[in-house]
Every structure is written in C-alpha cells, then in structure tokens.
Image: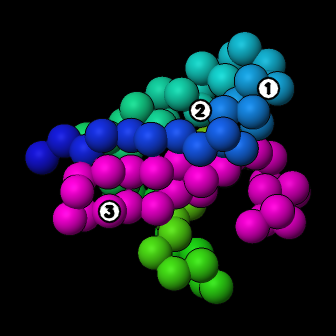
Amino acid sequence: MSYSIEITREALRALAKLDKPIRRRLQAAIDKLGSEPRPHGARALQGLKGAYRVRVGDYRVVYTIDDGRLIVVIVDLGHRREIYRNL
C-alpha cells in the first residue's frame, strides 16, 4: 500500500531554509515514508498522540499517519536541537 504525503506550511518553510544537500536528504526520507510510513528507526513521540519522528543525520522529520485515508502528514522538520521546541 502506498501512502500519499502532505506537508504543512511550517515544514515547507523549514525545508526551504536548509542547504541544498540537506534538503535533498530530507526530501528522499520524506518520499520513502510514502511506501513505508513506519520504517525501522522511526519512533513514536511522547506527548504528541500519533506523531512519529525519523532521523536523517542531525535532522528530524516529525509526522503523523492517517491509516484510514492512507496519508502521511509531515508536521515539521529541523535540526535535532531545535525541532522539539516548537511542537
């Protein structure tokens, strides 16, 4: 089953601010979430029901999964030091 991917405005803004090589790596990780929304290494976030995070080097992609509609929503992404402050 393939999931469609939606990206919030906050995540798009954060992605646009990053350097091109990092942006490519994060975009590749986001694209993979469409085929496997719970990859090895993905962790459920405490305090945010239904939210997961996946590591991409020093960066994190925070997302939710809607299994009923087969959608992965990218909530936010950023450097590991800063990403959890805004959630």
Residue 73 magenta: yes
Mark 1: secondary structure: loop
x then y, percent, for residue 28: 48, 27
CA separation in Å, label 3 and label 1: 27 Å
**Which residue does the numbered mark 1 point to in the structure image?**
18
Could you say which quadrant of the image residue 57 lies in?
top right
Q: Residue at x 32, y 51 (%)?
A: 71
The type of residue carrying mark 2 is Leu
- The boundaries of the magenta stretch are 60-87
CA separation in Å, label 2 and label 1: 10 Å
Q: Which mark is residue 54?
A: none
Mark 2: secondary structure: helix
The answer to whether residue 31 is visible is yes
Q: Which mark is residue 26?
A: 2
Q: Around disc 2, counting alpha carbons within 10 Å, would you say few (fewer than 14), some (14 to 19), or many (20 or more)? A: many
* Label located before the other in sequence (3 or 2): 2
* Label located before the other in sequence (2 or 1): 1
